[in-house]
Structure formats: structure tokens, C-alpha cells
């Protein structure tokens, strides 16, 4: 009788950044004492550097031009806070 699952899937932050929709499926065991693990990336995986999810880096706030960038860009953007945030992100990508 097995009391604890020993099979695991692990990743680091860099890998999760590349594959944000990844998921793990534990498959039924066979004759081995290990169960197979299926790692799915997405249902229709297409990796592109331009389509990566945005990740805010706290170090950007320490950049000497950060505050000026925000002050200049914010008034030019539409009134929705979400749209304003998106408008700030696009030039940073």
C-alpha cells in the first residue's frame, strides 16, 4: 500500500515564464513502481517571444527614467486603468 506520492514534476521560474499554461497530469501506474507523468504545455502551443505574458520587474522602479516614463505616458492613454496599464507595458516589451 502506498501512503505518499513520490512522483513529482518540478520547474523553475524561467521555465514557467516560457510555459505559463503548463499543467501536470498523473497517469495510472503500470507494472513499474513509478507512475507516468504527462506534462502538457497548452492545447495549441505556439511559443513566441512577442506573445509572452507581461511580468513586472520591481528593479524597473529603481531605473532613473522610470518615474518620468510613467508621468509622460499615463496622461496620453485612455481613461481605463487597465488600458492605461496595457499602454505602459507595450513599449517595455
Image (tube, helix red, strand yellow):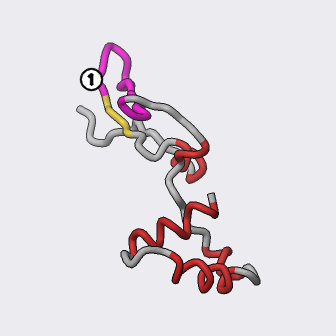
Q: Is residue 92 rendered to the left or right of residue 79?
A: right
Q: Quadrant of residue 29?
A: top left
Q: Farthest right residue?
A: 64
Q: Is residue 87 above or below residue 18?
A: below
Q: Residue at x 27, y 35 (%)?
A: 2
Secondary structure beneath label 1: loop
Q: Is residue 69 above or below residue 55?
A: below
Query: Where does the N terminus fall, quadrant-wise?
Result: top left
Q: Is residue 35 magenta?
A: yes
Segment tinted magenta in the rendering: 27-43
Magenta: predominant secondary structure element?
loop
Q: Is residue 34 magenta?
A: yes
Residue placed under numbered mark 1 in the picture: 28
Question: Residue 30 at what x, y percent from top left?
Answer: 31, 16
Q: Is residue 65 rendered to the left or right of residue 25?
A: right
Q: Quadrant of residue 37?
A: top left
Q: Residue at x 39, y 71 (%)?
A: 82
Question: Residue 55 at what x, y percent from top left?
Answer: 54, 61
- Total residue callouts: 1
Q: Nearer the viewer, residue 86 or 48?
A: 86
Question: Residue 53 at what x, y percent from top left?
Answer: 50, 53
Q: Is residue 75 rendered to the left or right of residue 57?
A: left
Q: Residue at x 63, y 63 (%)?
A: 92
Q: Residue at x 51, y 67 (%)?
A: 87
Question: Residue 24 at what x, y percent from top left?
Answer: 37, 37
Q: Is residue 75 rendered to the left or right of residue 22?
A: right
Q: Farthest top residue?
A: 31
Q: Nearer the viewer, residue 1 or 41?
A: 41
Disc 1 packing (10 Å; few <14; some 14–19; many ≥20):
few
Q: Nearer the viewer, residue 63 or 91?
A: 91
Q: Is residue 26 above or below residue 78?
A: above
Query: Where does the C terminus fall, quadrant-wise?
Result: bottom right
Amino acid at each position: 500500500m502506498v501512503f505518499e506520492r513520490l512522483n513529482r514534476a518540478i520547474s523553475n521560474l524561467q521555465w514557467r515564464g516560457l510555459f505559463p499554461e503548463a499543467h501536470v497530469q498523473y497517469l495510472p501506474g503500470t507494472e513499474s513502481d513509478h507512475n507516468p507523468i504527462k506534462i502538457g504545455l497548452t492545447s495549441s502551443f505556439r511559443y513566441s517571444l512577442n506573445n509572452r505574458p507581461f511580468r513586472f520587474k520591481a528593479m524597473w522602479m529603481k531605473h532613473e527614467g522610470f518615474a518620468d516614463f510613467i508621468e509622460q505616458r499615463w496622461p496620453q492613454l485612455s481613461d481605463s486603468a487597465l488600458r492605461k496599464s496595457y499602454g505602459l507595458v507595450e513599449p517595455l516589451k
